[in-house]
Image (spheres, rainbow, N blue to C red):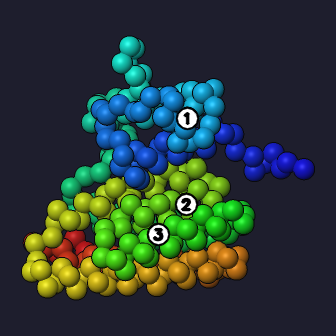
């Protein structure tokens, strides 16, 4: 029997996927045009009706807008009408990176704890796949920020809390800009990156194992340690002139 309390409409799932393409995967930037309906229908594996409903949801949330005769576009979040969203949109401000880590330490462990309550076998398979893709990228020496974001975003979606899920993209977007703040020697940077890589491999695996076991406290502790370690590593690589922020 279908549990209507946990039922999520196809259009809502599609809207969430498109939002992730914008804020997490960074496939579409503010002002850019989305692919045509046929391409999106094929990628998302949904009907035209469901896609149009998803677009309506994102328009209502001021993430997309339609330009008649031209197509569907991502909103310009620098617009004054979107000032609330603009305060959370990616910025090159190292102090906000600190704030992002503080929020992640408060939110993500609890988010992961809640996710265990709702996880299904297919969810576990998806998180296993994302953990494996992230690990393979790290071990092959490739950039893995997109895979890392997708791993954490997948867990956020399982938390059954829309605010957790919405905030994840903004927090990761801020952290991604720490590259702009690095002003250290190659050796110092490489050392920090190696530590970040090891932290991701070890704790993503522990988080996954706790999810498989449906160990809510285990996943909460693993997530908290993972983020705390990342915060400490990032603190060690920021320029000395902003050291006081940490």
Q: Residues within 10 Å of mark 2 (few under 14, many from 20)?
A: some
Q: In the rendered image, which quarter is residue 10 located in? A: top right
Residue at the top extreme of this rendering: 69
Q: Earlier in the sequence, mark 1 or mark 3?
A: 1
Badge 2 is on which residue? 154
Q: Residues within 10 Å of mark 1 (few under 14, many from 20)?
A: some
Residue 131 relative to residue 10: left or right: left
* In this view, the mark in front (2 or 1): 1
Identify the residue at horizontal 62%, vertical 37% (top origin): 46
* In this view, the mark in front (3 or 2): 3
Locate residue 4, reporting x and y percent.
81, 45
Q: Quadrant of the C terminus?
A: bottom left
Badge 1 is on which residue? 41
Locate residue 85, reporting x and y percent.
38, 41
User: How far separated are the C-alphas under marks 1 and 3?
Assistant: 25 Å
Identify the residue at horizontal 57%, vertical 27% (top origin): 52
Locate residue 117, reporting x and y percent.
72, 66
Q: Of the numbered discs in the image, which one, if any, rests on residue 133?
A: 3
Which secondary structure, mark 2?
A: helix
User: How far separated are the C-alphas under marks 3 and 2?
Assistant: 13 Å
Residue at the right extreme of this rendering: 1
144 in relation to 22, above or below: below
Decide if residue 108 is in sight here: no
């Amino acid at each position: 029997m279908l549990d209507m309390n946990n039922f999520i409409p196809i259009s809502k799932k599609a809207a969430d996927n498109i939002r992730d393409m914008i804020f997490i995967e960074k496939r579409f930037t503010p002002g850019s045009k989305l692919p045509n309906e046929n391409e999106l229908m094929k990628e998302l594996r949904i009907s035209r009706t469901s896609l149009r409903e998803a677009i309506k949801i994102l328009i209502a949330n001021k993430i997309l807008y339609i330009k008649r005769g031209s197509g569907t576009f991502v909103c310009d979040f620098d617009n004054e009408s979107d000032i609330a969203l603009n305060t959370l949109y990616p910025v090159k401000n190292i102090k906000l990176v600190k704030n992002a880590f503080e929020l992640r330490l408060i939110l993500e462990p609890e988010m992961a704890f809640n996710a265990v309550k709702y996880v299904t076998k297919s969810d576990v398979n998806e998180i296993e796949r994302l953990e494996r893709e992230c690990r393979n990228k790290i071990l092959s020496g490739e950039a893995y920020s997109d895979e890392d974001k997708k791993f954490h975003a997948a867990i956020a979606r399982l938390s059954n809390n829309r605010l957790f899920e919405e905030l994840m993209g903004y927090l990761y977007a801020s952290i991604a800009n720490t590259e702009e703040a690095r002003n250290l020697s190659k050796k110092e940077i490489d050392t920090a990156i190696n530590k970040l890589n090891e932290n991701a491999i070890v704790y993503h695996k522990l988080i996954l194992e706790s999810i498989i076991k449906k160990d809510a406290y285990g996943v909460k502790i693993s997530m908290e340690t993972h983020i705390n370690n990342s915060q400490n590593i990032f603190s060690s690589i920021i320029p000395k002139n902003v050291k006081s922020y940490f």
